[in-house]
Image (tube, rainbow, N blue to C red):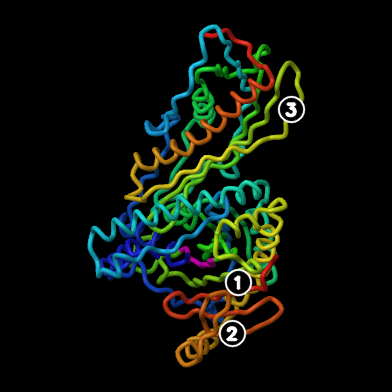
Amino acid sequence: MSVRREGIFIAVLGALLSGCVSAPKNQSIPAEGRSIVGGREVQISVAQGEIKTNINASNMTAAAGGGLLFALVDAGVESHRAGVAEQVAKPLRDALVGYDFDARAQERTKATLAELDWFAPRDYSFVKEINADARSAKLDAMASSQMAFVDYEYSLTPDFGAVEISVTVSLANKQAAPGQKPVTRLSAANLAYHQQSEVLIPLNNASKRKEENADRWAGNGAALAKQALDTGLTRVQAVIKRGLTQSANDLSALDQGMRHGKPTVAGGISGLLVETSNAGTLLWLGDPVYRLVLVTEPVG
Amino acid sequence: MGIRRLAALGVALAAGGCVPQQSLVLSSHYTPPVSDVRVTRVPARGRSVCLVGIISLKDERADPTTLGTVLGRPVRPPPDVMQWLQQIMLALNAPGLSVVLNDAPSAGTRLEVELVTAWVTELRTAKSANIVLRVTYHHGDGGAAEAPKLYRGAASSIDWNAGDGELQRMIDRALAGIVAQMQSDLLAGCRTNGGSAAAAR
């Protein structure tokens, strides 16, 4: 997160002691909360038109200990980096035109949730925009007492050396907490469940130059990028399922391991090793992100 | 990414108190950014200009209701997307090119144009826009269609506060890139195919 947004975020946290936003802790569904009368409506989102790019943050403000001038320099540097990343991504994006990530994400999600009898998914919908007001209205209108939001994001790492697929699953109640406004049903603290899962699919022997990596992803009709996205979409389902079925004790064990265990590095990410399998290396990233990350074998 | 999204949602909740953030509805009028207005060489008097007919304009976006959000602010397409696309096509008019919004039988070049995607996003403190048109060219009278060609316009800039002006300008800059690429291809195609049909002005 950028220094600027971090600042905003902290300010918001400070200003809203009522708790509109807080670090997510509700990452397991207790046994008694699994089954919901009438089942759960599900809204899937892919709030992007094409594969996203990422850039490294400019940290001059942090290094200098603050200051408006440095913040402006950071913003200028990041704008330049964004322009370069967007330019370099063009051939890959062009080659991916016609690859329907959205349809694949919906299909895989439906298959995954159907495997969890207690989840009882019903009335799927799909949106291309995440909007708190629209979601709150959806909660008002739904027939169920709880709704699942499954938010997908797919992107390239800053060096274009890997494709990332990230999925956030949230369960929001129709009923707002006593004394709170309806929109607060969507704040992290009030969600019945909130878990982010991520899959990282590295490019084999990736270059340090993003231009070279972009060429490889885009080559042959973006064959490698499509392979990575298909693999990622399949593999992330198991991580989603693991998150939905993990118990509070599982989480506690992960947090204990995070505090006392030796971190493992995979795909440039450091975290607690959960397991290694044919699917890849599964890491747990504890406080403050509380995220499960699967790093797969490289493609290409 | 999850924390950024959470932060954006938090900002939306806080800033609005839970009051909705007004969405930006883009203007149907395409205004080329001043810095991007290119000076095209004026053909000598008596030289013909290339007549370009737009056979069809289609909106093929996955979701025609949104371009995405910037700092939690929804960005909406113009209320009349067809009018917007027509404006963009008319912006192709330049010395040497005369564009008409119909299937002019005498046109040397005829185009089928599809809006494939138009979206905005954020990259840390920057924002970016991407717009893609898929264009199929038909040259000459009853000429076979060429393989469709993609035209991508992209622009990025510092994300100040997701204001109307900065978002509209970013979209217009992305469109200017498409207009410039298409003008260049149309002029080159006219030279190659001898597709001149209108008298010089």
Near mark 1 (Cα within 10 A), the count class, few <14, some 14-19 or many ≥20, is many
Image location (x, y in percent) of residue A102 = 63, 54
B162 vs A14: above or below? above
Q: Disc 3 marks which residue? A: B145
Q: Main secondary structure of the magenta part?
A: strand
Residue at the image position 64 percent from the left and 68 percent from the top: A120
Q: Amino acid at mark 2?
A: Val
In this picture, residue A147 sits left or right of residue B162: right
Mark 3 or 1: in front is: 3
Near mark 2 (Cα within 10 A), the count class, few <14, some 14-19 or many ≥20, is some
Depth check, front residue: B57 or B90: B90
- Please give the chain letter of the residue carrying mark 1: A
In this picture, residue A152 sits left or right of residue A17: right
Q: Amino acid at mark 1?
A: Ile
B170 vs A107: above or below? above
Circles 2 and 3 on the same chain: no
Image location (x, y in percent) of residue A155 = 55, 59
Q: Which residues are magenta?
A: A168-174
Q: Disc 2 marks which residue? A: A274
Image location (x, y in percent) of residue B136 = 67, 30
Q: Which numbered disc covers residue B109?
A: none
Label 2 secondary element: strand
Near mark 3 (Cα within 10 A), the count class, few <14, some 14-19 or many ≥20, is some
The C terminus of chain A: image quadrant: bottom right
